[in-house]
Amino acid sequence: MTKLAARYRPGTYPRGEDTRRRILEAAIEVFARDGYEGASTRKLAEEAGVNLPAIQYYFGSKEGLYRAAIAHIGEQIEQQLAPVAEHVRAALAGSGLARGELLGLLYAMLDAFVALVVDKKQQQPASRRLLIARAEAECSAALDLLHDAVAKQLVGPCGALVAKLLDRPVEDEETVLRTLTILGQVTIFCNKGALRTLGCKDISEKQLASIRAILRQQTAAIIGAVKEVAQ
Amino acid sequence: MTKLAARYRPGTYPRGEDTRRRILEAAIEVFARDGYEGASTRKLAEEAGVNLPAIQYYFGSKEGLYRAAIAHIGEQIEQQLAPVAEHVRAALAGSGLARGELLGLLYAMLDAFVALVVDKKQQQPASRRLLIARAEAECSAALDLLHDAVAKQLVGPCGALVAKLLDRPVEDEETVLRTLTILGQVTIFCNKGALRTLGCKDISEKQLASIRAILRQQTAAIIGAVKEVAQ
DNA sequence: GTCTATAGTCGGATAGAC
DNA sequence: GTCTATCCGACTATAGAC
């Protein structure tokens, strides 16, 4: 099965595009809902509205389909964060950024991350998040595809900004730890226990605005910029 | 299956204690490694060194065993956080705590949480964390047992401290959001991507000390206590 | 209380017609 | 490319001996 799954290369789909896509999108839903082992090929096929062997035909195996589903989410994340990440990279390539500008860029990254994590106006928002949580717990090899996307488009740029703001090297451990804890302020809202503490099933538009404001204020405090910064 | 699983009441074990415990401890390991669906009763029995029907005998069903495993972890968490939580509750029951004392209590809670999350000197540390992550992703009903423990012994006390420090009501949404983001600084280290960013497989004693120090400094900044506090 | 043996079901994958 | 029919192994759970 590993042989067939490994043979899959993203970007090359010589076969029925629409059928393939239908299977992939249904798979994200079903894998998220039932987990890898819990999602039977029969359920996957039925939910996609195709027959059983189609999965083997298009993805080689159940595992191949799973990897493709994770890879697809990785690409979505990469694309969704691309605009801010590129913007930050471009800004950092130039020299002599003011402290306020650096903070502003960091805020922009946090906003993008919040949108990725809690915003409901996303395609397959709930299932995507759930599938990521499952993949994270399952430690599957496919997980690297997600980690790479997040590292490249989120942790990398944020780390660079934090390093400049703290006037420390990027690889410095304290820089990394501070970057991670800053991002942790956001990731807590992936947790279902957090939502339960808030006493609601999901985060409202009003709460979202509160979260964004609180993140800015706290992140500024963490960075040590006591005076408020416009943006 | 639900009927039998529901029949189990914690604390009443009229049957072979040692066998029961062996199954329970092996189950935490196997459920963490393979997930609920991935963990077959055969594997569970083999790993525990018992025969297959023992699971039905002691826990009614596979699901009953799973719920018992989660409940067991919930009790461990509750007990592990009990000393600090009680200490905070007792301190808050009295009146007129200085700002520094409140912050000290909050630091103590964060230290306890860090120990719970990343400390290796725990019983079944890795599998316990993994099983929690899986349960969180799987949205199982048993999850409530974990949430209750964390709410009672961690989020509750921390929320009360943050409320006092910010001079806001406890139920206030901003109080809750700030409490959650503060705790989020810690939970990020449950994430495998975070460890990958740090470039290591698990967190060393030295990094642990750094994390604790950074958490204190940042939490103080978040709370708005600019001057350092001893403890 | 502990075990062997087995019932009954459902899983992933494939063969081969169209 | 798409489907029906089917193989065979693995699963949970139970019956009943000891």
Image (cartoon, coloured by chain):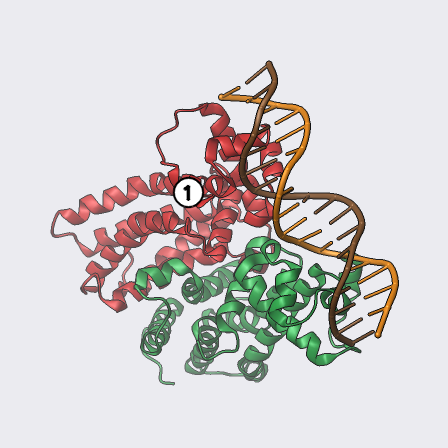
Chain colours: A green, B red, C orange, D brown
Q: Quadrant of the C terminus of chain A?
A: bottom left
Judge by depth and name the residue closer to the eye, B26 or A171.
B26
Quarter holding the N terminus of chain A is bottom right
Identify which residue is drawn at 58% across, 39% down.
B41
How far across and down, in percent of the image, does residue B72 sit? Answer: 42, 39
Classify B10 as above or below B89: above
| Residue at x 34%, y 38% (from the top left corner) | B79
Name the residue rendered at 26%, 68% in the picture. Answer: B173
Residue B99 sits in quarter: bottom left
Where in the figure is residue B211, as x and y percent of width and height? 44, 53
Is residue A148 visible in the rendered image? The answer is: no
The secondary structure type at the circle numbered 1 is: helix
Quick one: A76 or A96, which is closer to the camera? A76
Q: Residue furthest left?
A: B95
Instruction: Please say whether residue B221 is visible from this viewpoint.
Output: yes
Q: Which residue is mark 1?
A: B3
Question: Which subunit holds the residue at mark 1?
Answer: B
Apparent side of residue A111 relative to residue A86 in the rendered image (left or right): left
Q: Is residue A124 above or below residue B12?
A: below
Indicate the amino acid at tag 1: Lys
Q: Quadrant of residue A58?
A: bottom right
Relative to B205, is A37 above or below?
Answer: below
**Of A218 and D8, the residue lying toward us:** D8
Q: Quadrant of residue B161?
A: bottom left
**Label 1 crowd (10 A; few <14 / some 14-19 / many >=20):** few
Residue B27 horizontal/vertical position (percent): 53, 38
Coordinates of residue A149 in the picture (x, y in percent)? 61, 70
